[in-house]
Image (cartoon, helix red, strand yellow):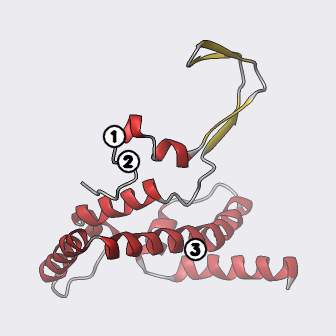
């Protein structure tokens, strides 16, 4: 369907966001992009990048909860209590702050099964020095540096010997 399809899709999504009253639209409408190009780019990112990373994260969360029924029961109790307290009131994005264990479960899933394994990378704008195992290492301006999320998120020096275990607490 080519370039025209993506553009048509993004523009239709932008219109739906502007007209909708849902929680996602509220969040997106709070921040006004500075240009139409930024708005268009955000629509494409939300559609494609957001879809895959969310699906990836939720799939791994379900996997981790299936492996550990005590975490699963704790999360179920929190969600049941949330709905009991909520009754028939309209839910806003701020209400989800009350689901602290669910947030910790999602964050722990992102730590173990990051959707963006490549991590952060930058080009140095000036010379720099980092500490290496055998002393200082000079990095020249223009050098590309990268910290891989996967290795950092599972590093036992940062997370302890059980760094590969799912533990929302």
Q: Residue at x 55, y 19 (%)?
A: 133
Q: Using residue 22 as the reference point, say whether residue 127 is left or right of it.
A: right
Residue at image mark 3: 51
Residue at image mark 1: 160
Q: Quadrant of the C terminus?
A: bottom left
Label located before the other in sequence (3 or 2):
3
- Asked if residue 132 is positioned above or below residue 147 in the image, the reply reads above
Q: Residue at x 30, y 58 (%)?
A: 104
Task: Tell me the mark number nearer the camera, choosing from 3 and 1.
Answer: 1
Give the percent coordinates (x, y) of residue 144. Answer: 74, 32
Q: Report how far apart the C-alphas of labels 3 and 2 lie in the structure.
A: 27 Å
Quarter where residue 132 is shown: top right
Quarter where residue 71 is shown: bottom left
Q: Are marks 1 and 2 in contact (CB under 8 Å)?
A: yes
State the residue in front, 25 or 44: 44
Determine the secondary structure under disc 3.
helix
Q: Using residue 144 as the reference point, say whether residue 92 is left or right of it.
A: left
Q: Residue at x 29, y 56 (%)?
A: 167
Residue at image mark 2: 163
Count residues near mark 1 (Cα–Cα under 10 Å), then give few for <14, some for 14-19, many for 20+: few
Label located before the other in sequence (3 or 1):
3
Count residues near mark 3 (Cα–Cα under 10 Å), then give few for <14, some for 14-19, many for 20+: few
């Amino acid at each position: 369907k080519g370039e025209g399809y993506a553009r048509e899709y993004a523009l239709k999504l932008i219109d739906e966001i502007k007209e909708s009253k849902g929680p996602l639209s509220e969040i997106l409408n709070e921040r006004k992009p500075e240009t139409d190009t930024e708005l268009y780019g955000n629509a494409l990112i939300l559609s494609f990048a957001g879809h895959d990373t969310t699906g990836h994260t939720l799939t791994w969360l379900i996997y981790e909860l299936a492996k550990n029924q005590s975490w699963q029961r704790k999360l179920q109790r929190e969600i049941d209590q949330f709905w009991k307290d909520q009754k028939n009131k309209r839910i806003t994005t701020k209400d989800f702050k009350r689901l602290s264990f669910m947030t910790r479960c999602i964050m722990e899933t992102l730590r173990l099964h990051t959707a963006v394994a490549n991590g952060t990378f930058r080009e140095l704008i000036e010379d720099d020095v980092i500490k290496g195992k055998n002393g200082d290492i000079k990095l020249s301006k223009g050098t590309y540096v990268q910290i891989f999320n996967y290795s950092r998120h599972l590093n036992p020096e940062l997370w302890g010997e059980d760094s590969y275990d799912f533990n929302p607490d």
